[in-house]
Image (cartoon, rainbow, N blue to C red):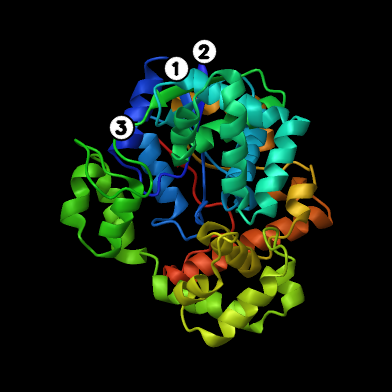
Amino acid sequence: MKICAVICEYNPFHTGHLYQLNEAAKKFDHTICIMSGNFVQRAEPAVAEKYVRAEIALRCGASMVLELPIVYATANGERFADGAIKTLKSLTDINAVVMGCETDDTDALITLADIQSREDDDFKALLAANLDNGLSYAAALSSATVTKAKEANISPDKAAEILTKPNNLLCIEYAKAIKRNGLDIKPVFIKRKGNDYNNISEIGNYLSASALRELIYKNDYTAAIPYLTGEYGILLEELKNHKPDKKTFSDLAVYKLRISSTDEIAKAFDCREGLEYRLSDAARSCITIEDVLLKTKTKRYTMSRLKRVILQVMLGITDEFYKNSSFLPPRLLAIKENFKPYLTENGKNMIIRTEDMLRYDGEYYERYFEVEKKAAALYSVITENKDDLFTPGKLICL
């Protein structure tokens, strides 16, 4: 039996995701999805609740969907990838990670990942110099990688082009995380159909998740439906009842920043170099989270980083969750009936029932479950959902 994994968000699930699962099915018997929960890597609420997205994935070809622990799901690309690969490390018989990339030159992709993984003295010096010149970490890392790529016979133009694409960057982080965690699993690349995250134009039968979210928040479901696969009815029903309210999320974010001391803000993992003072000052003079971001953003502090810091403050995510090497268990969201035998050996490393949380005792896990409770409460408020979103829901089986 050949099993692959796909690291995903499905926010929302669209025809490009269906293409990837169909391509994976040509090479593997089963696909396990490691999926973000109710908050995603963009540090925003998911457009639909995690069980809804998991059910759609199952109906479209996945054999099992596990929730990526929230401290990883809402982290930067490196820690998002590392958390997903650590989750895979707890599972057996995984042969490969199937990744969607935006380049045909996957050899160059692997070479760039190796350059960043090695972090030789020359590379470190380049990175430090770029940071000293005021570049954000992402920009500094990209510039140093482009410079070193010439030594590996990759032209600066090609390296720079590869490093501008968000899915290529994630593929590089996945490859680095596989190596860092010592996993004997193969990266399998599938060229993406359609555009990257931020491109809102149509390519053939594909539209980016970002463009689809824009249509959804405009209530333009007619325009979105052709790109949502045949299972869109499940999503539309959820959106009808529990679509996230952006204004409520913004109000709660500003409120949390206003009542938090600078010391409390500084505890957020991605908060560095006095950023807590800029955020605190902005929150006291701005009404919306968008205005806070615009007032705080600099060349060094990107929008993505600022949004992560704000969500980390809201949920209480501090650096202890990244410095501590203790295993954080994924939640089982959905599974095919014919794949249930896989749980015989692997179910012990997942949260399937409420009592499974009792296996994870100690102060560290208590604090982690408090983060999950806050996330569940926050998502339920902004989606007007009366359900208890913290304790495991009814397992979806098809």
| Front position among marks 1 and 3 | 3
Q: Quadrant of residue 226?
A: top left
Callout 2, which amino acid? Answer: Met
Q: Position of residue 396 (x, y in %)?
A: 45, 42
Instruction: Establish if 306 lies above or below 258.
Output: above
Gap in angstroms between the C-alphas marked 1 and 2: 6 Å
User: Does residue 322 appear left or right of residue 254 in this picture?
Assistant: right
| Residue lying furthest right | 362
**Residue located at (58% from left, 64% from top):** 311
**Residue located at (75% from left, 60% from top):** 367
How many C-alpha atoms fall within 10 Å of the one at disc 2: few (<14), some, or many (≥20)?
Answer: few
Answer whether residue 353 is visible to the viewer in this image. Answer: no
- Residue that badge 1 annotates: 29
Instruction: Establish if 93 lies above or below 394.
Output: above
Answer whether residue 260 is visible to the viewer in this image. Answer: yes
Callout 3, which amino acid? Answer: Lys
Question: Which numbered dot is residue 233?
Answer: none
Nearer-the-camera pick, 309 or 137: 137
Which of the marked residues, 3 or 2, is nearer the chain's N terminus? Answer: 2
How many C-alpha atoms fall within 10 Å of the one at disc 3: few (<14), some, or many (≥20)?
Answer: many
- Asked if the residues shown at circle 1 and circle 2 are in contact, with their CB atoms under 8 angstroms apart, the answer is yes
Nearer-the-camera pick, 381 or 21: 21
Which of the marked residues, 1 or 2, is nearer the chain's N terminus? Answer: 2
Callout 1, which amino acid? Answer: Asp
Question: Which numbered dot is residue 1?
Answer: 2
**Residue located at (30% from left, 59% from top):** 214
- Residue that badge 3 annotates: 193
Gap in angstroms between the C-alphas marked 3 and 2: 28 Å
Look at the numbered disc 3 and give the secondary structure of its residue.
Answer: loop
